[in-house]
Amino acid sequence: MTNFSYKPTLTGELVVLRPVDEGDYDALKAAMDDPDVIRFTGSRGEIGDEQARQWYRTRNDQTDRLDMAMAGFVVEGRLRDELYWDGEWVDSIVMSVLAPEWKARS
C-alpha cells in the first residue's frame, strides 16, 4: 500500500494545490452542501458543521489517502453499475495519476 503521510504543496503557474485543513471549511461549505457533491463523495444525509470541521482536522493524519482536487488525474475507466445508490445502480468513475506524473509535479 502506498504511504501518503507526506502531503506536498504543488505550485503551478496559475494554481497552488495544498493539503486541506480546518481553515478551508468556510470556503468549501457551499460545495459540501451541493447535492451532486454529497452524492458522489459517498456522504449520507446532512453533515453538521462540527462533523465537517472534524473531517477537515483529520485529513492530514491519513496515511492511506491523499485528497486533492485537480492534480493531473485522468479517467482510467468506468465500473458500470458498481454502486447501489438511492434505489438504483450507478456507475463509478475510476481516476488516477501515475507515479512518474505525480513525482514530476511534487
Image: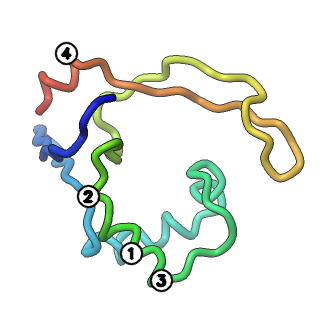
Distance from the alpha carbon under mark 2 to that under mark 3: 20 Å
Callout 3 secondary element: helix
Task: For marks 2 and 4, give the one nearer the viewer.
Answer: 2
In-image side of 43 versus 53 (left or right): right
Callout 4 secondary element: helix
Q: Which mark is residue 49?
A: 3
Task: For marks 1 and 2, give the one nearer the viewer.
Answer: 2
Distance from the alpha carbon under mark 2 to that under mark 4: 24 Å
Mark 4 or mark 1: which comes first in sequence?
1
The residue indicated by pointer 2 is 61
Q: Which mark is residue 100?
A: 4
Which percent across, then down, holds residue 57? 30, 70
Distance from the alpha carbon under mark 4 to that under mark 1: 33 Å
The residue indicated by pointer 1 is 54
Residue type at mark 2?
A: Asp
The extreme right residue here reads 87
Quadrant hosting residue 44: bottom right
Residue at image position (63%, 21%) is 78
Residue at image position (48%, 22%) is 75
Callout 2 secondary element: helix
Task: For marks 2 and 3, give the one nearer the viewer.
Answer: 2
Are the two marked residues, 2 and 4, in contact with CB atoms closer than 8 angstroms? no
Are the two marked residues, 1 and 3, in contact with CB atoms closer than 8 angstroms? no
In-image side of 7 versus 36 (left or right): left
Residue type at mark 4?
A: Pro
Which percent across, then down, holds residue 96? 40, 25
